[in-house]
């Protein structure tokens, strides 16, 4: 008898077909999830196999694989750019690849899964055994990038909540004293400040813990968080300052890969059940904690002491040079040992030489203010969550909370940290030359407002100039590097396929490998409608077993839209629930470049009267492109935007016979261009539904050929009317 994990070698078109399963998922969008599902299902059918595909898109899991499905399966293909739970596939042949491979190499994957390693439940062999062969390399870098982004995304709420509560309590309850801005112990605002401080203290462990979690799942969460706590508390390794967010990144990766290594160790079967909940967390936490305290902690403490001694020898040098050095140090690690060394050096000289603290005070707010200003100056370079974080950073910067810039530095260290340091150095130099004094150990504009600064005009000049320098250098470095969030961690990390489409449609419950790290809208309340709308188009035909989606949760109401779309072409030239009409179809694009094509498509949509601000629609579409190309491959591009520049959902379509370079992962030029624009309020429902409908139908080569060959607008509408 043949085991499900050992299918017959002659299975295929010439013999009994295999029973295959697949899971497709992409972390930042929706289209690739369903494109990969459709391609895999089509390939399996053509090769004589049966396949059921579970899709884990932005609207949640659809067509979920049952225990019975798994028990009967001959192999499992996971085409995903985010973590997928593999514990249910123990004992099965599992092939793990990028979602792009599911789209572009489905036949090859089906052949490979027959010889894929059997998943033993340690979370390692299947994930890293076959993936590189199918993906063509770069997978390790992608894991590193996604882990870092996962940590950043979970850290942001702690930064914002902690920082803003501290800032508000200082503003409304603080008194200026020789010890800094002090809040009376028994006051209401002291309690608010304490709550904010707790949030700030949890920020570093959260960053470290969720980096580890993304690498090695739940067993790595505890060692990652404990390691982050140790990194943040220098008193554990005789340092006056902790290792800050840089130390947390180190402990996060150490914890994650340490847990992965422990998972490889073969243990008796009776020990396996307690490995993930007892053995691995205890061993990894103890090993990492002891290693950091006794091995890494001592060099950190040594660096802190030497920096302090070195700074002590600089007090006789020029004020400008000292200001530059202090500014560079303050902005380098934003709360880490280098920052704390400079701050404590300045604070220790407040009573004797307040000019030293004056240079520190001018540099302290520059990183958060500069990053916040950058999000205002070039909004299209940043996604919605980054822009919101930028506003919070501006507020924190005013109150001298340098940590407000940490989310930006953690996401783009090679661009943000140099920009912060340059701005901090400029601010420190100006304050030093102008002999700005700060009589309290605190920084930021708040100390000037509360009367603790001598030389207020030049203090604000230093802060403003330093902030501008940081913002402009950040923008310049992002422009040189393509503006991509992942450019620092890995120019190709996650690949175009990972973020190519619908970055706005981030899941409301991020995967452990969270990669939407700082992306826009969740599925909102439209889950039911979107879920129904992405059901397989032929639930009774031969594909029913492969991609049929779960029943809609709204009792079938969402089905009305596709049915209306199917009948619309004969009734009045409307498809996709009437969002695409004769007015929004163009037989031939005049544009020969992507930017020009987006502008032309926006003008096409404006003809409907549903576009209140064409320029803003173009800006929103460009901002979406900055997150990742909307060129899907297969000669398709679907630029889209969620913006209140439109008053109602509207869809446009145009053809480009010559093709337009759109940065598609398969290198093809876009000949079929759709543009989707929805108001912010509709983004969680219609946006996802339209994207899912289009991406599924457009996977059919015959459908694309008929769309390219349609003679006129009427013929185009008749072909598009088949989308359901």
Image: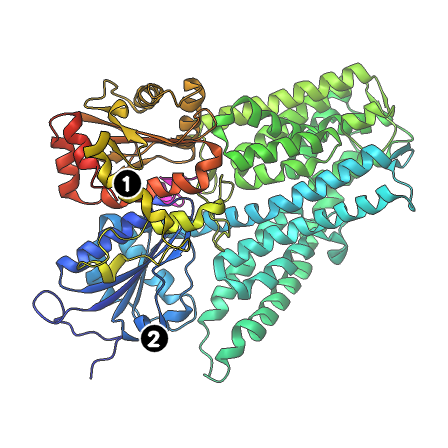
Question: In the structure shown, which secondary structural element does the residue marked by tag 1 occupy?
Answer: helix
Label 1: few (<14), some (14–19) or many (≥20) C-alpha neighbours in 10 Å: some
Residue 694's x, y, as percent? 28, 40
Quickly name the residue at label 2: 91
Residue at image point 29% right, 65% down: 76
Quickly name the residue at label 1: 564
409 to the left or right of 572: right
Q: Earlier in the sequence, mark 1 or mark 2?
A: 2
Residue 690's x, y, as percent? 34, 40
Residue at image point 68% right, 56% down: 229
Residue at image point 54% right, 53% down: 211
For residue 157, what is the image quadrant?
top right
- Tally of numbered tags: 2
Magenta span of residues? 490-503
Question: In the structure shown, which secondary structural element does the residue marked by tag 2 occupy?
Answer: loop
Instruction: Report the predominant secondary structure element of the magenta stretch.
Output: loop
576 to the left or right of 420: left
């Amino acid at each position: 008898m043949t085991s499900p994990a050992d299918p017959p070698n002659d299975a295929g078109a010439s013999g009994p077909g295999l029973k295959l399963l697949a899971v497709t998922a992409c972390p930042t969008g929706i289209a690739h999830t369903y494109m990969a599902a459709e391609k895999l299902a089509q390939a399996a059918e053509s090769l004589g196999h049966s396949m059921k595909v579970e899709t884990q898109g932005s609207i949640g899991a659809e067509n979920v694989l049952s225990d019975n499905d798994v028990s009967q399966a001959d192999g499992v293909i996971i085409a995903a750019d985010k973590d997928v739970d593999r514990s249910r596939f123990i004992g099965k042949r599992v092939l793990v690849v990028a979602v792009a491979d599911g789209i572009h190499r489905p036949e090859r994957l089906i052949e490979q899964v027959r010889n894929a390693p059997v998943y033993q439940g340690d979370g390692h062999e299947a994930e890293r055994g076959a993936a590189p062969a199918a993906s063509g390399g770069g997978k390790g870098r992608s894991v590193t990038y996604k882990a870092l982004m996962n940590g950043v995304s979970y850290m942001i709420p702690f930064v914002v909540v902690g920082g803003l509560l501290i800032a508000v309590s200082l503003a409304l309850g603080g008194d200026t004293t020789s010890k800094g801005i002090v809040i009376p112990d028994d006051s209401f605002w002291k309690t608010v400040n304490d709550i904010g401080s707790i949030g700030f203290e949890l920020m570093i462990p959260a960053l470290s813990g969720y980096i580890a979690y993304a690498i090695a799942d739940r067993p790595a969460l505890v060692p990652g968080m404990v390691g982050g706590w140790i990194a943040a508390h220098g008193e554990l390794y005789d340092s006056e300052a902790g290792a800050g967010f840089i130390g947390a990144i180190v402990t996060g990766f150490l914890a994650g890969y340490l847990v992965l290594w422990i998972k490889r160790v073969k243990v008796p079967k009776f020990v396996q059940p307690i490995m993930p909940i007892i053995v691995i967390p205890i061993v990894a936490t103890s090993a990492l904690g002891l290693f950091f305290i006794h091995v890494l902690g001592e060099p950190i403490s040594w660096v802190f002491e030497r920096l302090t001694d070195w700074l002590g020898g600089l007090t006789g040098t020029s004020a400008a040079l000292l200001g530059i050095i202090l500014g560079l140090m303050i902005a380098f690690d934003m709360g880490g040992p280098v920052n704390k060394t400079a701050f404590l050096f300045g604070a220790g000289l407040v009573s004797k030489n307040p000019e030293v603290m004056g240079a520190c005070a001018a540099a302290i707010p520059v990183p958060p203010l500069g990053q916040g200003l950058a999000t205002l100056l070039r909004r299209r370079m940043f996604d919605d969550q980054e822009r919101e974080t930028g506003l919070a950073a501006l507020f924190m910067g005013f109150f001298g909370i340098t940590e407000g810039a940490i989310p930006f530095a953690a996401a783009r260290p090679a661009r943000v940290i140099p920009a912060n340091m340059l701005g901090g150095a400029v601010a420190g130099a100006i304050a030093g030359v102008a002999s700005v004094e700060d009589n309290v150990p605190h920084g930021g504009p708040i100390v000037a407002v509360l009367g603790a600064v001598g030389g207020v005009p030049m203090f604000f000049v230093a802060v403003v100039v330093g902030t501008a320098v940081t913002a402009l250098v950040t923008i310049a470095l992002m422009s040189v590097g393509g503006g991509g969030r992942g450019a620092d961690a890995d120019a190709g990390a996650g690949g175009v396929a990972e973020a190519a489409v619908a970055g706005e449609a981030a899941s409301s419950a991020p995967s452990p490998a969270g990669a939407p790290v700082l992306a826009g809208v969740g599925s909102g309340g439209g889950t039911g409608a979107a879920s129904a709308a992405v059901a397989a188009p032929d639930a009774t035909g031969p594909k029913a077993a492969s991609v049929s989606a779960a029943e809609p949760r709204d009792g079938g109401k969402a089905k009305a839209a596709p049915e209306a779309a199917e009948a619309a072409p004969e009734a009045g030239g409307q498809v996709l629930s009437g969002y695409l009409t004769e007015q929004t179809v163009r037989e031939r694009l005049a544009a020969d470049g992507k930017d020009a094509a987006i502008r032309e498509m926006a003008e096409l949509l404006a003809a409907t009267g549903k576009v209140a601000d064409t320029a803003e629609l173009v800006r929103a579409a460009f901002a979406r492109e900055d997150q990742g190309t909307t060129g899907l491959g297969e000669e398709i591009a679907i630029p889209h935007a969620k913006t209140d520049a439109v008053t109602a959902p509207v869809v446009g379509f145009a053809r480009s016979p010559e093709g337009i370079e759109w940065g598609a992962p398969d290198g093809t030029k876009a000949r079929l261009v759709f543009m989707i624009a929805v108001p912010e309020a509709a983004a969680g429902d219609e946006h996802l539904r339209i994207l899912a409908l289009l991406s599924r139908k457009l996977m059919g080569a015959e459908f694309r050929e008929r769309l390219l060959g349609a003679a006129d607008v009427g013929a185009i509408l008749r072909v598009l009317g088949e989308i359901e």
